[in-house]
Image: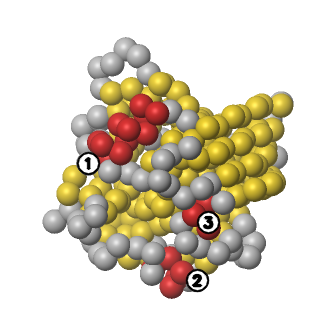
Amino acid sequence: MRPLLSMEWRNVLFAHWPVPVETVARSLPEGLSVDTFDGSAWLGVVPFRMADIRPRGSPIGRSFYELNLRTYVTLDGQPGVYFYNLDADDRLGVAVARRLFRLPYYRARMTAHRDGSRTRLQSVRTHPDAPDVRFRASFEPTGLPEPARDDSLATFLTERYRFYVADDRGRIYFADIDHPPWDLQPATVTFDRNDLFAASGFDTPDSERVVHFSPGLDVTAGRLHRHG
């Protein structure tokens, strides 16, 4: 993979819910299959700080918070992430991501406050002609970082090195990313408001959530390719 962008992902929360396979299957574009663990599909809410994101060779980077709703899929045996939405507090970053990667990015007004190890994050979507989304949550790690076992649920949910998108004509594209393996910590999270599920046509899951935290890592991303 020839890197197109480099960036840092910092202060990352992974909150995941198991859901029935059919819940996710009916939301996917044709060609993508649900990736499962222990017979369940998974929906993930992932807020984090995108830091020092820059094109290859650029001396100047941009930083902003992002909030996304995602699931896990396969295509021709290749696992990856499928995003339902990505809200970000950066007008230029949203425009570039939409153009270069065809990702469903939306502009949002976001504030984050750190109090020791606890982060309080608030987001209000401001993107024109998009479903209203408001989000308020606080989260903090409760243990030490350590690598996940290869066959664990944590690895299934976090070690993803490709994302898939589909255009208005149903054509599927993908891009690869690269980073070291995640070091993960147990964490707690309180959601005061979370409109992400409703904005993407889901009921809020009533299953028990699984939560991880990472202080972050460095990431590179390659160009978008059309599948097939």
73 left or right, relative to 51: left
Q: Which residue is mark 2?
A: 20
Residue type indicated by callout 3: Phe
Question: Residue 225's x, y, as percent?
Answer: 22, 52
Residue type indicated by callout 2: Pro
Q: How many marks?
A: 3
Give the spatial CA distance, label 3 vs label 2.
15 Å
Q: Residue placed at 38% from the left, 56% from the top?
A: 163
Could you say which is closer to the camera, residue 113 or residue 117? 113
Q: Is residue 79 visible?
A: yes
Q: Which residue is mark 1?
A: 224
Q: Nearer the viewer, mark 3 or mark 1?
A: 3
Relative to 116, is 203 above or below? Answer: below
Question: Residue 145's x, y, as percent?
Answer: 69, 43
11 left or right, relative to 222: right
Q: Secondary structure at mark 1?
A: loop
Q: Which residue is mark 3?
A: 197
Relative to 47, is 110 above or below? Answer: above
